Amino acid sequence: MKRNKSDFVYDIKIDLHGLTTMQAFHRTLGTIESAYKNGDRKLLFVTGIGDPARGTGAIRAEFPTYLDHPSVRGFILDAKYESGKYLVKLRKNKLSVIVND
């Protein structure tokens, strides 16, 4: 487990900078599905802050819709935005505990 500056302990950190919104969408869903299956529960997604005046920040704006996608919605316990990153907590996967133990 690693920590970021706000003391959020995370299992996986994904930087979405430089991706298109479609690439970020697929990377986010793939990461959540894989993490859930592997029993990782705390994810840090770096989206950046963005500046709408400059036409940036599309991933940050779209990210909540990624988390609401039917393929991952049931895995998510909590998510919050903080300074250019989303802190996502996944529900406990009881099957991964059995398989990984």
Image (cartoon, rainbow, N blue to C red):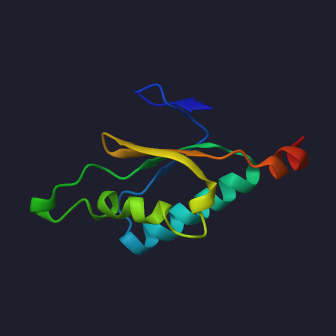
Q: Residue at x 49, y 30 (%)?
A: 8
Residue at the far left in the pictured view: 53
Q: Nearer the viewer, residue 79 or 30?
A: 79
Q: Nearer the viewer, residue 98 or 35?
A: 98
From the image, which quarter does the N terminus lie in? Answer: top right
Query: Based on the displayed image, in which of its 4 quarters is residue 21 positioned?
Result: bottom left
Image spot of residue 82 (x, y percent): 34, 39
Q: Residue at x 61, y 39 (%)?
A: 11
Q: Is residue 22 above or below residue 11?
A: below
Q: Residue at x 57, y 31 (%)?
A: 2
Locate residue 11 relative to residue 21 in the image: left or right.
Answer: right
Residue at the far bottom in the pictured view: 22
Q: Residue at x 61, y 69 (%)?
A: 71
How many numbered dots are placed on residues in this image?
A: 0
From the image, which quarter does the C terminus lie in? Answer: top right
Q: Nearer the viewer, residue 14 or 95?
A: 95
Locate residue 40 relative to residue 77 in the image: left or right.
Answer: right
